[in-house]
């Protein structure tokens, strides 16, 4: 009987260590693209979806930003003012020197 209790206790302990907490952190490399002439950025579903040829020079805003590995929070969407703040904090960096609106 004592062996049975020990086995059950071990199973419960093992289960508690194998369940991982879900994290909602942002990962370096996420890409945010400009969808308007005023600078309205949204995160692409996959960084691999980014195509620099989709940047149309119809705005003086950065066409796209990339998430850095700096600790902190970046929202899934933001405006150009927030982009400036995020850039100053080191959380995002321009993808390249392209200015304009990203056409999906």
Image (cartoon, rainbow, N blue to C red):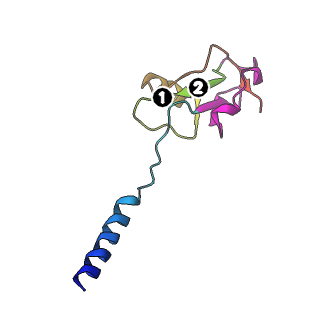
Picture coordinates of residue 60, whole percent (x, y) = 67, 17
Q: Is residue 39 magenta?
A: yes
Residue 76 vertical position relative to residue 21 in the rendered view, above or below: above
Residue receiving disc 2: 65
Residues packed near mark 2 inside 10 Å, few (<14), some (14 to 19) or many (20 plus): many
In depth, the one of 80 and 22 nearer the eye is 22
* Residue placed furthest toward the bottom: 1
Which mark is in front, 1 or 2? Answer: 2
Q: Secondary structure at mark 2?
A: strand
Picture coordinates of residue 89, whole percent (x, y) = 42, 26
Residue receiving disc 1: 86
Tell me which residue sits at (64%, 20%) in the image: 61
Tell me which residue sits at (57%, 36%) in the image: 78
Picture coordinates of residue 24, whole percent (x, y) = 47, 48
The N terminus lies in quadrant: bottom left
Q: Is residue 19 magenta?
A: no
Q: Which residues are magenta?
A: 31-60
Q: CA distance from mark 1 to mark 2?
A: 10 Å
In depth, the one of 70 and 20 nearer the eye is 20
């Amino acid at each position: 009987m004592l062996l049975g209790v020990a086995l059950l206790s071990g199973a419960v302990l093992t289960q508690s260590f194998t369940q991982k907490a879900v994290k909602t952190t942002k990962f370096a490399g996420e890409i945010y693209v400009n969808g308007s002439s005023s600078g309205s950025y949204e995160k692409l579903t996959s960084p691999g979806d980014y195509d620099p040829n989709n940047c149309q020079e119809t705005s003086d805003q950065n066409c796209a930003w990339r998430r850095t590995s700096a600790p902190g929070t970046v929202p899934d969407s933001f405006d150009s003012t927030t982009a400036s703040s995020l850039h100053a904090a080191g959380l995002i960096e321009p993808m390249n020197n392209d200015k304009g609106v990203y056409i999906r």
